[in-house]
Image (tube, grey):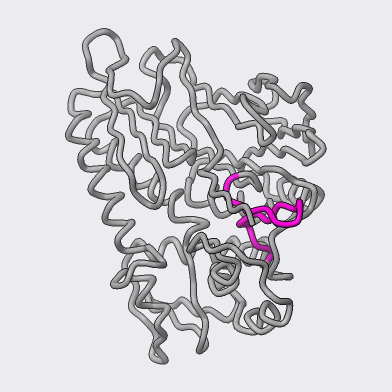
Amino acid sequence: MNGKNKAKGFAAFLAAAVSLTGCNDYSDGNGNMKTAEFFAMDTYISISAYGEDAENALDSCRREIAALDARLSVTSPGSEIYEINQGSKEGVKLSEDAEKIIAAALEISEKTEGALDISLYPVIKEWGFTTGDYRIPDKSDINRLLKNIGYDKIILKDSFLAMPENFQIDLGAAAKGYAGDKAIELLKESGAKSALVNLGGNIALLGTKPDGSDWSIGVQNPFGEGYACVVKTRDKAIVTSGNYQRYFEEGGRRYCHIIDPKTGCPADNGLASVTVIGGSGLICDGLSTALFVMGEKDAVEFWKEQGDFEMVIVTEDKRVLVTKGIFDECKVGELGKLEKIVK
């Protein structure tokens, strides 16, 4: 078996050939743009911020994200989620952060008819995606585990969480988006006017670039180098879910980490990636997973009904579909022609 662990495949780049991987300033020449780089939430993180107090703001972001990582990790003994998964018939009092993430995830689950389900953790673990010990489970094992899956059986009320016996949750489909939101809040409070938060490809933007122009964000080409397209935007979160990010191969077939709650198997519906662009990283993170599971037709219909976010879909046959709200500002990438999604 050839196991491959791919980081979030959504790359950001800036005009004027600015690198997010260096610690050099780029700004108006006064050295006010600072960059911090560190590892947390199982990914490489880079935050660049422009402002007089940027350095202290970046330190605050680092501490906040590290605290979230410690609290929300599903595999770290002593974390809030780890303790929740040990089971409690009386229910568990949640921290404010966990409550916000779980509430948003359950709302997305309801709207997408279960395409996102935070109770899938036992199945994800069975496939080896939490440990790197990849395997194709027996169908009987999947069916057994699916009996203890179901977002609609999770009760969240007055900051208390209650679940049936043997249920376990994982906030991996929403936690990085939430962390990006928290970082942007801290940067705003510090007086920063311009910032880019990159949590392993999960992007959150504050304002414009220091020169007043929009940020240029590249949606990665799932099939090779370069980008499927480039989006110009500001003050948004941009999150991608794709089958090329974390996967293993066996018998010439790729098995990605995004599990379909209905089958307990990796989603396999003709999509290579779904990118969601909106005002909340938490919502974009959860939606990108759910829409990937739903497939092209249902994802497009969901967008037409909801209409409060933008989206880029890359299909396995290398088509790039872009919603009309960002289509005119989207640049063609390595995959060629863009198709407009309209209502």
Say which quarter of the image contains residue 87: bottom left
Q: Is residue 200 above or below residue 162?
A: above
Which residue is nearer to you in this view: 5 or 19? 5
Residue at 33% across, 23% down = 22
Say which quadrant the C terminus sits in.
top right
**Quarter occupied by residue 128:** bottom right
In the rendered image, the residue lying farthest to the top is 29
Q: Is residue 234 left or right of residue 143?
A: left
Place of residue 189 in the rendered image (x, y in percent of width and height, measured from the top left): 25, 38
Q: How many marks?
A: 0
Which residue is found at the position 70% from the left and 20% from the top? 332
* Apparent side of residue 260 relative to residue 65 in the rendered image (left or right): right
From the top left corner, tell me how far across and down residue 89 is, in percent: 42, 91
| Magenta stretch contains residue 304 | no
Residue lying furthest front in this view? 1
Name the main secondary structure of what is drawn in magenta.
strand
Question: What is the quadrant of the N terminus in the image?
Answer: bottom right
| Image: 129 above or below 277 | below
Q: Is residue 302 above or below residue 87?
A: above
Point 43% across, 78% down: residue: 157
Task: Name the residue rendered at 33%, 44% in the picture.
Answer: 39
Would you place residue 184 above or below residue 206 in this image? below
Residue 174, percent from left and from top = 49, 55
Residue 26 or residue 128, whichever sits in front? 128
Read off the magenta span.
Answer: 245-260
Q: Percent position (x, y) of residue 152?
A: 60, 77
The image quadrant of residue 209 is top left
User: Is residue 227 rendered to the left or right of residue 28?
Assistant: right
